Amino acid sequence: MHEAASLVLLSRAGLPQMPKGPQEETSEDTVTSHLRAAVGGDWSRLEIQARSMAEHDLIRYCKEALSAMIGELVDAGPPLRG
């Protein structure tokens, strides 16, 4: 999960961004620091991967990662009632 989030965050580098308020800037810095610590030594590899990944590949990667995360949440959650 941290790797996917880091890859998405790093893929935004160089793209135009909407103006942010002071709280949003602090929040993004906090998220970036947290993700960098969570992936450890893989951060550099993810930076390179993010720069070299085509947009359609990034979208597919995100969809697959999101689908896997949802599957894990469903598997870990309480049984569905029917």
Image (tube, grey):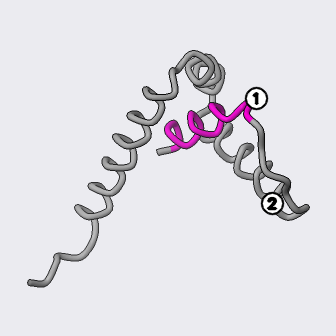
Q: Mark 2 or mark 1, which is nearer the start of the sequence?
A: 1
Judged from the image, the secondary structure of the residue bearing numbered disc 2 is helix
Which mark, residue 2?
A: none
Furthest-left residue in view?
Answer: 82
Q: Quadrant of residue 49?
A: top right
Residue 35 position in % (x across, y down): 64, 43
Q: Residue at x 51, y 36 (%)?
A: 3
Q: Residue at x 32, y 49 (%)?
A: 67
Q: Residue at x 65, y 32 (%)?
A: 10
Number of labels in the image equals: 2
Is residue 50 magenta-colored? no
Residue 15 position in % (x across, y down): 73, 33
Q: Residues within 10 Å of mark 1 (few under 14, many from 20)?
A: few
The residue beneath circle 1 is 14
Residue 16 position in % (x across, y down): 77, 38
Disc nearest the viewer among 1 and 2 = 1
Judged from the image, the secondary structure of the residue bearing numbered disc 1 is loop
Distance between mark 1 and mark 2 Cα atoms? 18 Å
Relative to 48, say whether 23 is above or below. Answer: below
Amino acid type at image mark 2: Glu
Q: Residues within 10 Å of mark 2 (few under 14, many from 20)?
A: few
Furthest-bottom residue in view?
Answer: 82
Which residue range is magenta in the image?
2-15
Q: Quadrant of residue 82?
A: bottom left
Which mark, residue 24?
A: 2
Residue 2 position in % (x across, y down): 53, 43
What secondary structure is the magenta-colored segment mainly?
helix
